[in-house]
Image (cartoon, grey):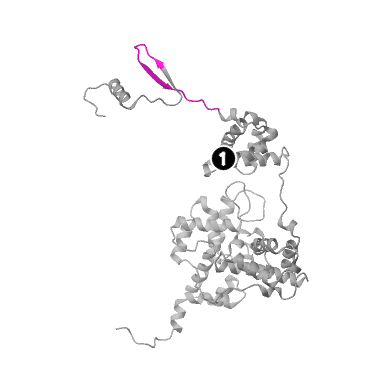
Amino acid sequence: MRVEHGQSGRQIGARAAAIFGQVERPGARRINRTDGTTMTRSTRKKHQSVDDRLRWLAPHVDSFRTWLGEKGYSAATITEVVRLLACWAEWVRNAGFDMNSIEQGFAASAAVFRGGKTARAPLGAAALFIDYLRNCSLLPPPERSPSPEEIWPVLPSFRAWMHEQRGVATSTLDTYQSTLVALLATLGGDPSGYTAAAVRGFVLDRASPHGRGRAQGIAVATRAFLRYLVATGQCPVGRDHAVPGFANWQLATTPRFLSTADVGRVLAACDGEDRLRDRAVVLLLARLGLRASEVAHLGFAQIDWAAGWLTVAGKARRDERLPLTQEIGDAIIAYIERARPRVTTARVFLTDAAPVCQLSRVAVKCIVRRALDRAGVDSPHRGAHVLRHSAATAMLGHGVSLSGVGAVLRHRSPSTTALYAKVDIIALVKVAQPWGGRLPC
């Protein structure tokens, strides 16, 4: 539509209405004016306030806020959780549920509050409120399905035997759990009936969708379980030999590591008062070569501040002492004094966000991954173990022998440390033989 010079706004509006038609917004109200013309005024639905929507839950809202504060949530987060709870409570009330049927309302709302993180947020606030009601015995505890240990009593017996006889760590047995549950579900709970063909078929079927590393883990878990069954007389002798092996050529790969410059960038990405914990975690990984589980389980009793030692409980329940350097000690003290939540626990590292709890092995890996992202380090290997390899290669670069590297990394076999000889370029140059062929033209 072309607008001619000198046309008034009313004339332009009349022409637009004639061309496109008069379109009224939903909820608009027509008003007659004194000059005979009409105008529309939109009427918006007045939304209820948070207090109005929570009125039917009012006897519990204040104590819910107090409970969240005791769990470590900040005042701003508590306010947001209550606001999201009001959104959920309004839907539940309109759907016909009340306090006597609030659990049914929570189950029904799962189909409504779904999708992205924002859409699921009210359901998350409701889950916290349900937990609060159960904690106060206002709701009965949820019905839980039996655990794998209750279904198959052989699992806790296997874990206890591996702890006592083999010294296997709990974290290692946790990685075995999913494979062993699938084994028992597939072959049954009577080990005396396991045949070699059935065992071999289970391992191959279980490992077929995965790569070599995961396939080896499945074979190791199955073999360890069968050896326990043989040792305790529950399975025919030699049944563990039915587990197939997977190709694993020794020293075929090269260590996954970051350069010294990249490690420095990762540490620089952990500077600041809000990342004191991350800096201490990364230093323990990159300087001492600790494993993610060893950092997560680090306790105050393992640190000897006076002598400058750090006692690490490694594999097979072997305690090893490592030097506590000034850099690492300062980072841990800075975190304890200025950033660590005031929670009574023997663990050093805790989560930042509420509810505050002990750091897990997976959380340590996430800390490293986020630090790599902030530093802009482009590496195909983004787990915590890449810093352990980086610590070994850095020591070799500074002239430390392979035996010294093995002592710091706490390797039980020198062949494990021999892998790092591939990155010791200076030593390899000394032993390299001259090329016997002809030079290219």
Q: Position of residue 281 (x, y in %)?
A: 55, 59
Q: Is residue 344 magenta?
A: no
Coordinates of residue 321 in the picture (x, y in percent): 63, 68
Q: Nearer the viewer, residue 399 or 169?
A: 169
Q: Residue at x 71, y 50 (%)?
A: 145
Residue farthest toward the right in the current orientation of the protein? 233
Residue found at the far top of this picture: 34
User: Disc 1 on helix, strand or loop?
Assistant: loop
Seen at 46% across and 56% down, the residue is 373
Q: Quadrant of residue 1?
A: top left
Image quarter in which the C terminus is found = bottom left
Decide which of 275, 222 is in the foreground and name it.
222
Above or below for 12 versus 342? above
Of the residues shown, which amino acid type is indicated by label 1?
Phe
Q: Nearer the viewer, residue 80 or 407?
A: 80
Note whether residue 39 is visible. Answer: yes
Q: Is residue 353 left or right of residue 393?
A: right
Query: Mark 1 = which residue?
Result: 113
- Number of other residues with Cα within 10 Å of mark 1, as a class: few under 14, some 14 to 19, many 20 or more: some
What range is drawn magenta here? 31-48
- The picture places residue 422, in percent across and down from the top left corner, at 48, 76
Residue 190 to residue 106: above or below? below
Of 335 and 316, which appears nearest the observer?
A: 316
Q: Is residue 308 visible?
A: no
* Residue 196, horizontal then vertical, whole percent: 69, 72
